[in-house]
Image (cartoon, rainbow, N blue to C red):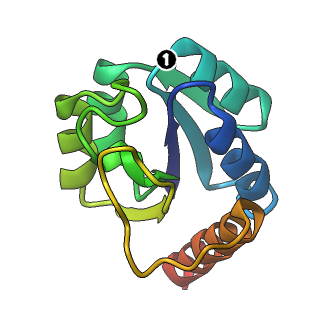
Amino acid sequence: MKVVVIDGMGGGIGTQIVSRLRQVIDSPHQLIALGANATATAVMVKAGADVGATGENAMAVTVPQADVVVGPVGIIIPNSLMGEITPVMAAIIASSHAVKVLVPVQQPHVELVGMEARPLSLTLDELASRVAELLKRAAS
């Protein structure tokens, strides 16, 4: 399976996601980092992604091949992450057939109601567990 982690800005959340997923993803599964900018890509690769690429075209080519897409909820919201997620990027990701496992990080122009306030580290641990469960289910 191909697991794609997408992030922008400084890649901080993506880096934390990659670090946790690296613990549950091994061969033959592939962990791919896609950044909205080169900095985000570089830090996710350094954190343990198998490969990385940057920008809208990289997303257009890679996301349709993904089995699981992971990142902050902003990756499916046009103009989020301070404008780094273009409307085209958001459409590519949102319309992908991949399972999306998203972190509910607040965006200035979008409110997520019904979400309990808790430390990001707990949410990211839950995300890693969910992806591990998806990989096990696909293997059986």
Residue assigned mark 1: 37
Tag 1, which secondary structure? loop
Q: Nearer the viewer, residue 140 or 4?
A: 4
Q: Nearer the viewer, residue 14 or 51?
A: 14
| Total marks in image | 1
Q: How far from the left and from the top, in percent, is residue 116?
A: 56, 79
Q: Is residue 122 above or below residue 32?
A: below
Q: How far from the left and from the top, in percent, is residue 137?
A: 53, 83
In the drawing, does residue 9 fall left or right of residue 123? left
In the figure, residue 31 lies in which quadrant? top right
Farthest-out residue, top? 38
Please name the amino acid that badge 1 sits on: Asn
In the drawing, does residue 28 fall left or right of residue 3? right
Image quadrant holding the C terminus, namely: bottom right
In the drawing, does residue 22 fall left or right of residue 42? right
Q: How far from the left and from the top, in percent, is residue 34?
A: 49, 31
Q: How far from the left and from the top, in percent, is residue 115?
A: 48, 77
| Circle 1 Cα neighbour tier, 10 Å, few/some/many (<14 / 14–19 / ≥20) | some
Q: Residue at x 54, y 25 (%)?
A: 9
Q: Is residue 76 visible?
A: yes
In the figure, residue 85 lies in which quadrant? top left
Q: Is residue 7 above or below residue 126?
A: above
Q: Residue at x 30, y 22 (%)?
A: 56
Q: Residue at x 39, y 62 (%)?
A: 100
Q: Nearer the viewer, residue 87 or 109?
A: 109
Q: Is residue 139 above or below residue 27?
A: below
Q: Is residue 65 visible?
A: no
Q: Residue at x 34, y 42 (%)?
A: 63
In the drawing, does residue 72 fall left or right of residue 107? right
